[in-house]
């Protein structure tokens, strides 16, 4: 079962790690054997650190805000909003200087006070549309 300390650690990981770029918090909270279910992300402590570095490289002043958080059994579920200014190349696309807002859903499982498993679903399509990396879909003509 999730403890109050697990919830506090989850919040610290997002607030200090992702929003402030403090990688030392990752060493404290993430298990070296943690499993990552988000496509393309590496497992373990170094995987989380790589994700933080990548996001903060793509977006200056990157900030992740927890909007909703629910505990169910051994999992923490959260709806978050990521914000920042695109000042770095994203997936091969040059920086745009645009402000972005991306919804992210996370599920985290803790054991013994450590994050041992994570599922993340960021709105990557919305991000690419905001950056102009993909054309905006046009409505179908009405017949």
Image (cartoon, rainbow, N blue to C red):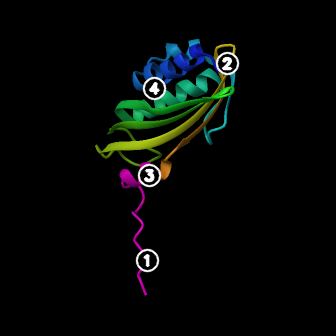
Find out whether residue 50 is within the magenta segment: no
Q: Is residue 43 left or right of residue 9?
A: right
Q: Nearer the viewer, residue 91 or 62?
A: 62
Q: Residue at x 37, y 31 (%)?
A: 62
- The quadrant in which residue 60 appears is top left
Of circles 3 and 2, which is in front? 3
Q: Residue at x 59, y 23 (%)?
A: 46
- Marks 4 and 2, Cα distance to the nearest angstrom? 18 Å
Please tell me whether mark 3 sits on a helix, a strand or a loop: helix
- Marks 4 and 1, Cα distance to the nearest angstrom? 39 Å
Q: Earlier along the polypeptide chain: callout 3 or callout 1?
A: 3
Q: Magenta-highlighted stretch: main secondary structure?
A: loop
- The quadrant in which residue 2 appears is top right
- The quadrant in which residue 29 appears is top right
State the extent of the magenta-drawn residues as a range. 126-143
Q: Earlier along the polypeptide chain: callout 4 or callout 3?
A: 4
Of circles 1 and 2, which is in front? 1
Q: Which residue is mark 2?
A: 32
Q: Is residue 91 left or right of residue 86?
A: right
Would you say the residues marked 3 and 1 are in contact, meaning their CB atoms lie under 8 Å apart?
no
Please tell me whether mark 2 sits on a helix, a strand or a loop: strand
Q: Which residue is mark 4?
A: 18
Q: Residues within 10 Å of mark 2 (few under 14, many from 20)?
A: some
Q: Earlier along the polypeptide chain: callout 3 or callout 2?
A: 2
Q: Which mark is residue 140?
A: 1
Q: Which mark is residue 126?
A: 3
């Amino acid at each position: 079962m999730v403890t109050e300390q697990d919830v506090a650690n989850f919040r610290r990981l997002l607030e200090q790690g992702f929003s402030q770029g403090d990688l030392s918090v990752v060493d404290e909270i993430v298990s070296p054997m943690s499993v990552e279910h988000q496509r393309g992300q590496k497992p373990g402590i170094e995987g989380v650190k790589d994700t933080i570095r990548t996001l903060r490289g793509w977006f200056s002043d990157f900030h992740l805000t927890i909007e909703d958080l629910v505990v169910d059994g051994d999992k923490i579920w959260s709806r978050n909003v990521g914000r920042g200014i695109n000042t770095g190349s994203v997936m091969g696309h040059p920086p745009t200087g645009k402000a972005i807002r991306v919804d992210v859903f996370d599920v985290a499982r803790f054991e013994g006070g450590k994050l041992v498993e994570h599922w993340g679903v960021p709105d990557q399509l919305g991000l690419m549309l905001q950056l102009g990396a993909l054309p905006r879909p046009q409505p179908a003509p009405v017949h």
